[in-house]
Amino acid sequence: MTAFEFSLRLAFIFLLCFLLTLGLTWLLRRWLLRRQILDRPNERSSHKAPTPRGGGIAVLAVLLPAWALIEPALWPQLLGALALAIVGWWDDLRGISPWPRLAVQIAAVAFGLWCMRPLADGQFTGGLLPQPFDALLAGLAWLWFVNLFNFMDGIDGIAGSEAASIGFGLAVLALWFGGFGDLDQLSLALVGAVLGFLYWNWHPARIFLGDVGSQSLGYLIGFLLLRAAGDGAWAAAIILPLYFWVDATWTLLRRARAGENILAAHAQHFYQRSLRLGRRHDQVTGAILIGNGALILFALGAEMGEPVAALAGAGLAVFVLIRRLMRRNEEGSISRAGRN
């Protein structure tokens, strides 16, 4: 295949996933409204009006077949994502205890990781750890990423924007440096699908991912990151999702130190607190998008031979982003007060 033909293939994958998800989300939204499957505001909510939830169904309906066509050998990971989607959909409809959900997540991660062994040879940390500890660390990181991605899906556009940012970063990484197999095609399929959904989820959101989408997307993105790490890009795999890592992990540790129930729902993440400081959903998500752009550059820098400096720079970028989010927006506060 020539370079031109390969470029056309990538463009086709992206556009097809985008257009299909765009249309399917519109149809799904109408069905959810008719069935009154809505996310109704409560004291922790960041939205004001009942909004359809379950938009992840449209994303997965496009993304899972696309990945299966690109690389049929990924069927174990696709089954794992489908299992999480089923549990998430049940949670969206009825609500379930965290423990059965966690058990399914552990099973999906363990099965997916075991089937990745021939791909990465267990070297997710670039040989820094012996293989058993390497695999254990990879499994725990994947499990945590599934949950933190679910935790961070709390305002309009944030989860879709993060998924698109990570997918774009991985695609650029694979195309620039080569040697990552089908990572570029898988990543661009992800970007196209989530952008098709993001059109409907941008502020003011007309549909939400729901647990059916956030858990399974976290699983699939976690797989892509581990695959990149297994192919040697371990620093980039840490850098690309770094804001989500820091916000979710720091909030969990802070709540645990305060003696709070870490399994209980809350609204204490940095991005949620930023809303209460006077910003709109699109302002918060936009700031995170800009920060993610910087993280993509640092990820590329890490693969150019400066992983330690890139990690330090990425950490500084996230620190600056969080400081920005935690600064009171007086203009937004005044305008909000005027509307009230």
Image (spheres, helix red, strand yellow):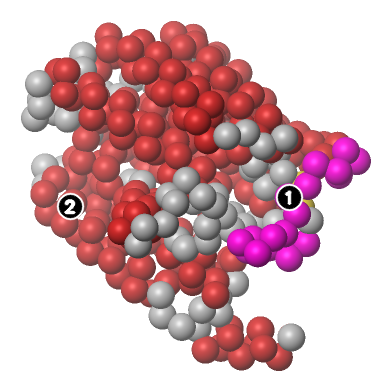
The quadrant in which the N terminus is found is top left
Of residues 252 and 280, the one drawn nearer to the viewer in this rendering: 252
Can you give x and y, in whole percent of width and height, for residue 264 in the image? 51, 50
Q: Residues within 10 Å of mark 1 (few under 14, many from 20)?
A: some
Q: In the structure shown, which secondary structural element does the residue marked by tag 2 occupy? A: helix
Q: Amino acid at mark 1?
A: Asp
Of residues 4 and 35, the one drawn nearer to the viewer in this rendering: 35
How far apart are labels 1 and 2 at the CA level?
40 Å
Q: Look at discs 1 and 2 and give the one toward the viewer.
A: 1
Residue under numbered circle 2: 310
Give the residue displayed 24% in from the left and 24% down from the top: 136
Q: Main secondary structure of the magenta part?
A: loop
**In the figure, is residue 253 to the left or right of 103?**
left
Can you give x and y, in whole percent of width and height, for residue 129 in the image? 10, 27
* Residue 188 in sight here: no
The quadrant in which the C terminus is found is bottom right
Q: Which residues are magenta?
A: 33-49
Q: Earlier in the sequence, mark 1 or mark 2?
A: 1
Give the residue displayed 62% in from the left and 57% down from the top: 156
Residue under numbered circle 1: 39
CB-based contact (under 8 Å), mark 1 and mark 2: no
**In the figure, is residue 115 to the left or right of 316?**
right
Q: Residues within 10 Å of mark 2 (few under 14, many from 20)?
A: many
Q: Tell me: residue 90, above or below residue 161.
A: above
Instruction: Residue 84: name its quadrant.
Output: top right
Of residues 254 and 193, the one drawn nearer to the viewer in this rendering: 254
